[in-house]
Amino acid sequence: DVYVNLPVGEFGGKQKAYFTGAVKDLSAGGGTATYDAVLEGLRLLLEAKQTLPNAKLMLFVLSDGVQNRGYSLEQIVPVAQGLGIPIHTIGYGSGADMTGLSALSNVNEASSTKADESNVVYNLRNIFNSQI
């Protein structure tokens, strides 16, 4: 299943605070359907674009493990390419599959980085600041 921890919204001070809180509240829980979550995130962004037509869309994927459920990278690449939305990836923890995450980010020339509990918020802040 894909869980939405924070609804899509215009990225201002309030949304940034919600985002930081949502990241800090994440916990590992077993099966990782990274690419299912990517498709849902892209769908939510396109839905939000209806009310924010001038928004610069970008997706952030934070994954703590190796993709082991759902769609494969090869299955979602054509969708990601067609939409042209940058997908920034953060591999969280020592078990993160950086090969898959980096390949996903490369589809639309986005960033990919590895983080742990001590620096994940710092890494996210750097990505946000470079994109906004």
Image (cartoon, rainbow, N blue to C red):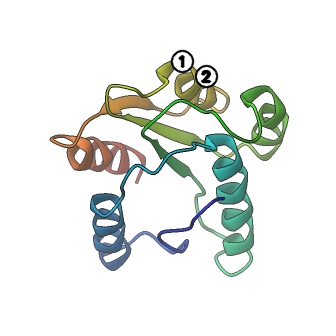
> Where is residue 73, by image quadrant?
top right
Q: Which residue is at the front of the view, 40 or 32?
A: 32
For numbered disc 1, what is the local secondary structure?
A: helix
Q: Which residue is drawn at 60% across and 33% down?
A: 67
Instruction: Kindly report which numbered mark, 2 or 1, lies closer to the viewer in this rendering.
Output: 1
Disc 2 is placed on an element classified as helix
Q: In the image, which disc is placed on residue 113?
A: none
Nearest to the observer: residue 90 or residue 24 = 24
Q: Residue 80: where, in percent of width, then height?
A: 75, 40
> How far from the left and from the top, in percent, is residue 9?
52, 75
| Quadrant in which the C terminus is drawn | bottom left
Q: Distance between the residues labelled 2 and 1?
A: 6 Å
Residue at the spot 74% in from the left edge and 77% down from the top edge: 50
Q: Is residue 15 left or right of residue 24?
A: right
Say if 28 sits above or below 21 in the image. above
**Label 2 sits on residue:** 103
Q: What residue type is labelled 2?
A: Ala
Q: Left or right: 38 with respect to 94?
A: right
In the figure, is residue 88 to the left or right of 41? left
| Image coordinates for residue 23, horizontal then vertical, percent | 34, 59
Q: Where is residue 97 in the image (x, y as percent from the top left)?
A: 49, 24
Foreground: 24 or 16?
24
- Dividing the picture into quarters, in which one does residue 33 lie? top right
Q: Do labels 2 and 1 touch, CB within 8 Å?
A: yes
Quick one: quadrant of the N terminus? bottom right
The residue that disc 1 covers is: 99
